[in-house]
Image: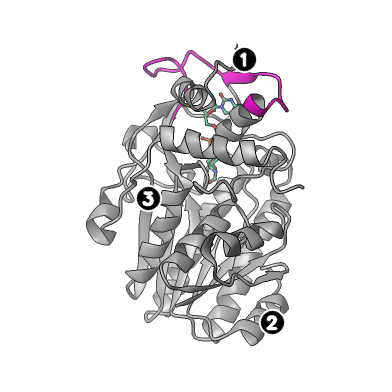
Amino acid sequence: MRVLLAGGAGYIGAHTAVALLESGHEVVLLDDLSGTQAVAAERVETITGKAAPLVVGNAADDEVVEAVFAEHGPIDAIVHLAAFKAVGESTQKPLDYYANNLDSTFALLRVGLAHGIRSFVFSSTGTVYSDPADLPFTEDSTTSVDLSNPYSKSKRMNEVILADVARVNPDVNVTILRYFNPVGAHPSGLIGEDPTGIPNNLMPYVSRVAIGTLDRIGVFGDDYDTPDGTGLRDYIHVVDLAEGHVVALEQAQPGLAVYNLGTGVPVSVLQLIASFEAAVGRELPKEFLPRRAGDVAATYCDPAKAAAELGWRTRLTIDDASRDYWNWQSRNPRGYSA
Ligand code: WQD
């Protein structure tokens, strides 16, 4: 298959490109570089020894997407990973988030369907689940558009739109993948997560403390109703996540399919920090802070559907993720910046 990866030079995108190339597929990367750098595409080629052409442009622009098909077609499938994804930022910039995260889907669908793509895979999120009583979340758990932030709302809106588009395109495979918390990096240490500014997410923040560019870890709340009082999340290694995309593409069937991509194993903030300290080989400075607005006590999935229908399950643990993330960060103290 030749696969267009929208957002293909990003954290999930670059790892998915490696997994697709190593499975014998071809890739074309489209990225506006708002959240990454072009060198990530070169690193994909270094890891795989295969071509990963990068088109720099906005996936929300039909003419940009048309040019990709003209230059690199025929294209069999689109994997749509191009989105703004910072929850806190989305509450400050709702219009930017709705415009970017929805217009990109519209443009990719209009052009892709006009060119006869067979598959469309959409990067969604476990934060579309709205009722903590449903834990562990299955694909049938309650979802809502009435969520805590525009980022998550934009993802749920995309899912609603894709269900209608799938209904009137019965021959097309439309797959929605609900990610839980991506962590880790490729074991080569050549590609990884490279957040701009101060990271919002836990593992990149802990890693910046370990490398010395941030002073100490702030633990947001130790009074949750969880075993150690800190928040529980389902941390999935990005290499497992990437392989989940390959399997979902290869086994896609006509119509709409929804899969959770997670481990099903809840891990606390303190457990993740302890795992990272073991990878680094020393204790890291930390302090307990008040809860962060919008956080929930726990979110993790039941990964049984992907196992039953795709034969896919995660292989890697939080310790693998800490080891690989620290390897990436140690080799690239300033991320992709030279
Ligand atoms: C994890 C835990 C925090 C930072 C986010 C997005 C979600 C998805 C995954 C894309 C929580 C605690 C964090 C810190 C801390 N992204 N924490 N100190 O909020 O579960 O989900 O990433 O799909 O959309 O919202 O991830 O890493 O920010 O937080 O104590 O400095 O770590 O309270 O319990 P989150 P996170």
Q: Which residue is mark 1?
A: 285
Q: Nearer the viewer, residue 248 or 337?
A: 337
Q: Which residue is mark 3?
A: 260
At label 2, the amino acid type is: Ala
Instruction: Identify the element where label 1 is drawn.
Output: loop
Give above or below for 130 relative to 23: above
| Residue drawn at 73 percent across, 28 percent down | 213
Judged left or right of residue 53, residue 26 is: left
Instruction: Identify the element where label 3 is drawn.
Output: strand
Q: Which residue is mark 2?
A: 67
Label 1 CA crowd tier, 10 Å (few <14, some 14–19, many 20+)? few
**Chief secondary structure of the magenta span?**
loop
At label 1, the amino acid type is: Pro
Judged left or right of residue 133, residue 34 is: right
Are the two marked residues, 1 and 3, in contact with CB atoms closer than 8 angstroms? no
Residue 50, given in percent of the width and then of the height, sits at: 54, 70
